[in-house]
Amino acid sequence: FLLGIIRHGGFLPNEKVPDADLGIISTDVDRLAMTPETWVKNGMIRVKVAEGTFHLARKGLEENWVNWKGMNPVTGEEYPYFGVRLSRRMKVDGISSSRITWAGRSNAVYPYEHGAGGFFFPRLNIGSYNHKSHTEEMLRYNTEGANYRRLDTDELLTEENNEKGKPIGTVFNSALDCMVLKQFYFTMIYVPCDYNEILTAFYGRNWSHVESRGEEGKGNNAAMKLSAEEDLRSLRNGPKPLCASSIEGPLR
């Protein structure tokens, strides 16, 4: 999602279905649950703001990922949740409504307890689908300045230390406490001030160059860089049209 906003001003141009992977800082969820003005019941957090009422339902741990089992990589303790399900109820003519106007899921971003700190986002690969292709990408991006790490040992991921079952994630040395507005189609959206460092941690220093997973755009295909001509054409064409019904060949 962040890559599409910064590089294209919207969703990635050739995604068949617009994809907005969201992350939520786990410590922010904990803080909200302890705020006096927040209503908490049975794991549900309800927050009222001017734009409406937001509900955060904490999701349980998921164990179907190859390199993430929901355990704190330093202490070995299990994290209490994997992320949250977000939903919003809007006010109509100033009156609260029970109708859900938006819903989505957001996976947790956890504090990184090694070294200088920052946060990490677990790498979520499925063994029978995209683990092989995503591993190829992680290793290549690391040669280009990305920061995929073995979370248990704090080592940069390499072919030598890559092991199934060992925790892997993207580490970005950011406090995530500064936001800036960026263009998103006909409106503006907040993104982290240090978006360049975050995108570099995920995709390497060449994140501004468009890549493709082939005509089908499936996750089991490793992304490959487009030619300079194709890259320029993609950037000039802008983001995925909001009214488009079908565009083939998702790009990254």
Image: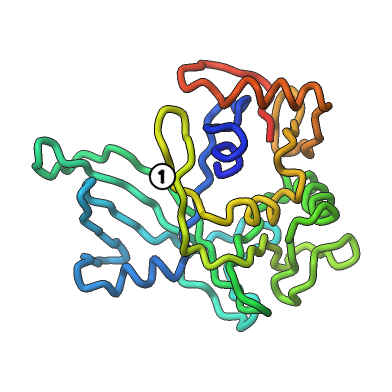
Number of numbered discs overlaid on the protein picture: 1
Image quadrant containing the N terminus: top right
The residue sitting at 65% across, 75% down in the picture is: 73
Q: Residue furthest right?
A: 160
Q: Residue 2 in the image: x percent, y percent?
A: 56, 44
Residue nearer the viewer, 121 or 58: 121
Q: Amino acid at mark 1?
A: Gly
Q: Residue 169 in the image: x percent, y percent?
A: 67, 62
Instruction: Provide the secondary structure element on which disc 1 rests.
Output: strand
Q: Quadrant of residue 113?
A: bottom right
Which residue position holds label 1? 104
Q: Residue 63 in the image: x percent, y percent?
A: 59, 61
Q: Quadrant of residue 228?
A: top right
Residue 25 left/right relative to 166: left
* CA neighbours of label 1 inside 10 A, class few (<14), some (14 to 19), many (20+): few
The residue sitting at 32% across, 68% down in the picture is: 32
Picture layout, residue 10 above or below residue 130? above
Q: Quadrant of residue 43?
A: bottom left
